[in-house]
Amino acid sequence: MSADRVSYTLDSTLETVNNAEQTAGRMATEAGFDDEEVMKISMAVREAAVNAVLHGNAYDPSKKVTLAFERTAHDLVIVIRDQGKGLDASKIPDPLAPDNLMKTSGRGIFLIRSFMDVVEIHPSQTGTELRMIKHVHGNPADSKEAPQ
Amino acid sequence: MSMKSSTRQVDGVTIVDLSGRITLGEGSVVLRDTVRDLLSKGQKKILLNLGDVNYIDSSGIGELVSAFTTSKNQGGELKLLNLTKKVHDLLQITKLYTVFDVKDDEAAAVQSFK
């Protein structure tokens, strides 16, 4: 099994969001995903980067975002970390609930979960780590829908 | 990366032709400013042509919701025209497809405002 890992340290800017999305698209393409999957992966990373830059680091120039990609034989693993207060995932409202449907924000994590196979949120006092995995095609045994 | 917007009038309906990306930052701002400007001028029948919008993120979705709600609250009507597959799929998974009035034929869409 081969493993390739690359990581970036990025400023808390809107440019970082765009760069993260573009890098994710490139990584996903190189990993062999088709166009639709590439779009989903790059959009998930974009949403994660938005959360890190806006909600985590709140555009604070002294705080950084780290973005890491790891390609294994079975997965593309993407980890994005901010230096904010820590996201409490249990307090994220369901954007599909009738009361929330017409809200103008709050869909980012939902879209990430919709587009990736595994999503883990690890908040701490020093920031939030969001770990996302997309399985390489032909590896359905690892799918989150598969029985344990 | 940016979004372009132009407007035209057809039988009392303002058609806004959008192209590019509706995302956090410039794209969302262009959409917001365009709709607010139209409403302030009393142009309250708005048809957003998204046929050349190839990408939209959660901020863009939020901006569409905001445009829809703002128009409605000001006695106007805002409909969507020519969704690309990507935008259609996004509105489906966020359960917004049935909230918006979505059209795929411009002439019929214009007539539907009357």
Image (cartoon, helix red, strand yellow):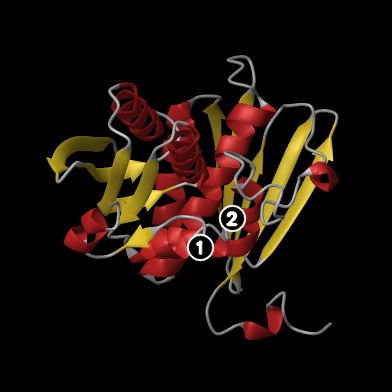
**How dense is the environment of label 1, judged by Cα within 10 Å: few (below 14), some, or many (20 and up)?**
few
Mark 1 lies on a secondary structure that is loop
Q: Name the residue tied to disc 1.
A: B98
Q: Is residue A24 above or below residue A140?
A: above
Find the distance from the CA under tag 2 to the CA under tag 1.
18 Å
**Residue under the image location 61 percent in, 48 percent down:** A107
Q: Mark 2 against mark 1, which lies toward the viewer?
A: 1
Q: Chain of mark 2?
A: A
Where does the image place residue B31, in percent across and percent down from the top left? Answer: 35, 34
Q: Is residue A60 above or below residue B57?
A: above
Q: Is residue B107 left or right of residue B86?
A: left
Where does the image place residue A37, in percent across and percent down from the top left? Answer: 46, 67
Q: Amino acid at mark 2?
A: Leu
Is residue A90 visible in the rendered image? The answer is: yes
Q: Quadrant of the N terminus of chain B?
A: top left
**Residue under the image location 14 percent in, 39 percent down:** B8
Mark 2 lies on a secondary structure that is helix
Q: Amino acid at mark 1?
A: Thr
Q: Is residue A51 left or right of residue A91?
A: left
Which dot marks residue A111?
Answer: 2
Which dot marks residue B31?
Answer: none
